[in-house]
Every structure is written in structure tokens, then in C-alpha cells.
């Protein structure tokens, strides 16, 4: 498993560091989970726009984007997808680009 600590940069905001740690959760192997039944999101590659990590970029992501933009007063959040330090309309195309709604690709076996 990849250890996130070696990829964290102390210059990054706490939100950026949390995002790296969150994405590294997806590196868990089936053996480490201790079961052949792996949650849906662990079977999928992380994909741009899937801020809630449910394996699908959909209306829930739009709703949660709006929630976090409001709660953080448009400061950085899980949905600061362009990593400019703001959760604002510049992030919306990362959710809605391409097919919408869309499933994230299946993870490759190791």
C-alpha cells in the first residue's frame, strides 16, 4: 500500500493534504480489508468530480458541491477540484464534464 505521508507537502493547505490522504484510502488491498467483499468505491478508480467517493459523478456531487461552497464561504473543500483554494463555479466543469452522470472506471486487479 502507498503511504501518503511521503507524498504530502507541508506547503499544501490542510484541505489538499486531506484530499491526498482520502485518495490513498483507495489503495487498500482486499487482503488488508480482510474480506473478499470490498466496498463499491474500493472497486473503482478515483475520478474527477466524485467528491463523495461513491464511485459515481452525479447530482449528489452537485448538491454536495453547493453545500460545501456555502459552508466554507467558497474556501477550499473536497470540491475544490481545480485546487485554487476556492470552492466556486470554476470547479463545476470538473463535475459536469463529459458524460453526466457517469460511473468512475473499475479499478484494475493487482
Image (tube, helix red, strand yellow):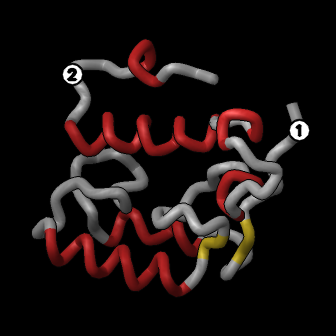
Measured Cα–Cα span from mark 1 to mark 2:
34 Å
Q: 31 or 94: which is nearer to us?
A: 31
16 with respect to 44 (left or right): left
Residue 44 position within the rendered picture, expressed as x and y whole percent measured from the top left:
73, 55
Residue located 45% across and 44% down the image:
22
Q: Which mark is residue 58?
A: none
Question: Under tag 1, what secondary structure?
Answer: loop
Q: Which residue is mark 1?
A: 109
The quarter holding residue 13 reads top left
Answer yes or no: is residue 94 visible.
no
Q: 78 or 110: which is nearer to us?
A: 110
106 with respect to 78 (left or right): right
First in sequence: mark 1 vs mark 2: 2
Q: 65 or 37: which is nearer to us?
A: 37
Question: Under tag 2, what secondary structure?
Answer: loop
Residue 9 position within the rendered picture, expressed as x and y whole percent measured from the top left:
31, 19
Badge 2 crowding class, 10 Å Cα cut-off, few under 14, some 14 to 19, many 20 or more, is few
Residue located 71% across and 49% down the image:
45
Q: Which mark is residue 11?
A: 2
Amino acid at each position: 500500500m502507498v503511504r501518503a505521508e511521503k507524498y504530502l507537502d507541508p506547503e499544501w493547505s490542510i484541505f489538499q493534504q486531506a484530499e491526498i490522504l482520502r485518495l490513498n484510502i483507495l489503495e487498500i488491498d482486499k487482503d488488508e480489508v480482510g474480506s473478499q467483499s470490498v466496498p463499491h468505491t474500493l472497486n473503482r478508480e478515483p475520478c474527477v468530480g466524485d467528491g463523495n467517493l461513491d464511485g459515481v459523478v452525479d447530482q449528489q456531487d452537485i448538491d454536495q458541491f453547493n453545500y460545501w461552497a456555502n459552508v466554507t464561504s467558497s474556501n477550499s473543500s473536497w470540491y475544490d477540484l481545480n485546487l485554487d483554494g476556492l470552492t466556486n463555479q470554476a470547479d463545476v466543469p470538473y463535475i459536469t464534464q463529459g458524460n453526466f452522470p457517469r460511473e468512475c472506471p473499475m479499478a484494475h486487479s493487482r
